[in-house]
Image: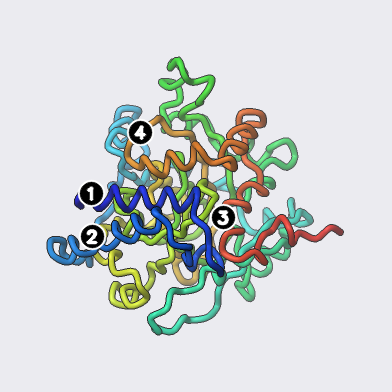
């Protein structure tokens, strides 16, 4: 894609993120007041679309993600994928974990049933092909329920799913992590031993796991395209999922919501729809963006580089349990504006402070970045029960 168009797009994106003011509505509607940032952003989008229509064919077939077995996930192989900034699926990489052997819905209901956890209310409506964007608030409706109620919902009405919850992983002194997960293996994959020798490690512990999150999802669970910083090591414990991922280079084709919290970005595109429907909704660049795909089964580990976009659907008839381990990434120039916005974001600075102090993330920080932007009524920090 032409550099001038990309530069205009990203300068506008960055300016609107930091200084843009909404005339009304909520961030996903992008009703910004006129400004230099808005002019640059719209010019960049327009020039990119003009170029793609002339020179880039529509991408119809997804590209398979590279697969290796656990024996093939050597330090040299993982260093290669980090250097190339490419995803890789490690087949059977977690089959020896105690979590793989013992985690189940009943396990969590029996041992953690009284703990309140943040949950998504899964959208149960089909959105008409009316040329309008799908409202994000339908995918980011949140509440708190007890773990046993979450488990019951997953197997009955399928209303709730838990996505990216961390606090429960640290209950009972972090037993779910220490006794059931193999952090040493994640650190082996991340190259931690190499990074420990770098002069900057104490300030930026590259390769170190800073977040351990649990996902428990019903068979109709789906996440829109989204992206976040750092390496993601997604460990499938139970169930089957279909993944589609895309390089941050093609971010303009995903029409991210411009918002003031830069630790997480979400697309306004529902990747389950066809290119034609998505274009009619106002997102024509999407059809020109190359996408990768993979099918993740229980015991597999999917490794995503920083800022790689992903959208995930549970296979019908398959509820799922999975874990994700996030590590800090070495400095790179693959997504310069996203990195700049993150490093200059006060929210991200506070999260970094907590991570360096406590060695983990907290559900309240995850909720602040994931949910509050779509609709103020969905801000868990305001709606959490006090009794």
Specify whether 103 is left or right of 275: right
Say if residue 66 shows up in the picture.
yes
Which residue is found at the position 68% from the left and 68% from the top?
152
Marks 2 & 1, CB-CB < 8 Å contact: yes
Q: Earlier in the sequence, mark 2 or mark 1?
A: 1
- The answer to whether residue 142 is above or below residue 115 is below
Image-quadrant location for residue 99: top right
Q: Nearer the viewer, residue 257 or 186?
A: 257
- The answer to whether residue 99 is above or below residue 353 is below
Helix, strand or loop status at disc 2: helix
Residue hosting label 4: 332
Q: For marks 3 and 1, give the CA distance.
A: 31 Å
Q: Residue furthest right?
A: 387
Helix, strand or loop status at disc 3: helix
Residue hosting label 3: 370
How busy is the neighbourhood of tag 4: few (under 14 within 10 Å), some, or many (20 plus)? Answer: few
How busy is the neighbourhood of tag 3: few (under 14 within 10 Å), some, or many (20 plus)? Answer: some
Foreground: disc 4 or disc 2: 2
Foreground: disc 3 or disc 2: 2
Helix, strand or loop status at disc 4: loop
Q: Earlier in the sequence, mark 4 or mark 2?
A: 2
Which residue is found at the position 48% from the left and 63% from the top?
33
Which residue is found at the position 23% from the left and 60% from the top?
47
Residue hosting label 1: 4
Q: For marks 4 and 1, give the CA distance.
A: 21 Å
Q: For marks 3 and 2, give the CA distance.
A: 30 Å
Q: Earlier in the sequence, mark 4 or mark 1?
A: 1
Q: Earlier in the sequence, mark 4 or mark 3?
A: 4
Residue hosting label 2: 47
Which residue is found at the position 40% from the left and 67% from the top?
269
Image-quadrant location for residue 167: top right
């Amino acid at each position: 894609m032409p550099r001038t168009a990309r530069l205009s797009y990203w300068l506008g994106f960055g300016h609107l993120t930091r200084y843009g003011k909404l005339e009304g509505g909520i961030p996903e509607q992008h009703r910004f007041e006129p400004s230099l940032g808005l002019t640059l952003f719209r010019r960049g989008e327009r020039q990119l679309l003009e170029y793609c229509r002339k020179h880039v064919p529509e991408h119809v077939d997804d590209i398979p993600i590279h697969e290796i077995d656990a024996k093939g996930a050597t330090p040299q192989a993982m260093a290669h994928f980090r250097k190339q900034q490419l995803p890789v699926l490690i087949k059977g990489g977690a089959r020896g974990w105690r979590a793989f052997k013992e985690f189940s819905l009943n396990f969590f209901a029996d041992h953690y049933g009284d703990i309140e956890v943040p949950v998504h209310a899964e959208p149960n409506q089909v959105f008409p092909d009316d040329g309008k964007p799908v409202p994000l608030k339908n995918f980011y409706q949140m509440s708190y329920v007890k773990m046993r109620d979450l488990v019951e919902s997953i197997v009955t009405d399928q209303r709730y799913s838990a996505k990216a919850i961390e606090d429960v992983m640290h209950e009972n002194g972090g037993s779910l992590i220490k006794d059931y997960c193999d952090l040493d293996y994640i650190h082996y994959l991340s190259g931690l031993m190499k990074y420990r020798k770098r002069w900057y490690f104490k300030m930026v512990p590259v390769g170190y796991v800073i977040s351990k999150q649990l996902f428990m999802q019903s068979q109709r669970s789906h996440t829109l395209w989204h992206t976040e910083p750092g390496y993601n090591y997604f460990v499938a414990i139970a169930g089957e999922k279909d993944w589609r991922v895309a390089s941050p280079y093609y971010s303009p084709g995903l029409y991210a919501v411009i918002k003031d919290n830069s630790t997480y970005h979400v697309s306004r595109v529902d990747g389950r729809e066809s290119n034609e429907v998505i274009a009619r909704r106002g997102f024509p660049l999407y059809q020109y963006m190359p996408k990768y795909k993979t099918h993740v089964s229980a015991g597999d580990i999917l490794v995503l580089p920083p800022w790689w976009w992903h959208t995930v659907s549970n296979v019908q008839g398959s509820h799922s349990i999975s874990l994700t381990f996030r590590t800090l990434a070495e400095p790179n120039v693959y997504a310069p504006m996203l990195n700049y916005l993150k490093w200059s974001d006060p929210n991200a600075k506070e999260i970094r402070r907590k991570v360096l102090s406590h060695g983990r993330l907290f559900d309240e920080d995850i909720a602040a970045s994931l949910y509050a932007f779509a609709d103020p009524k969905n801000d868990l920090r305001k709606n959490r029960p006090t009794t």
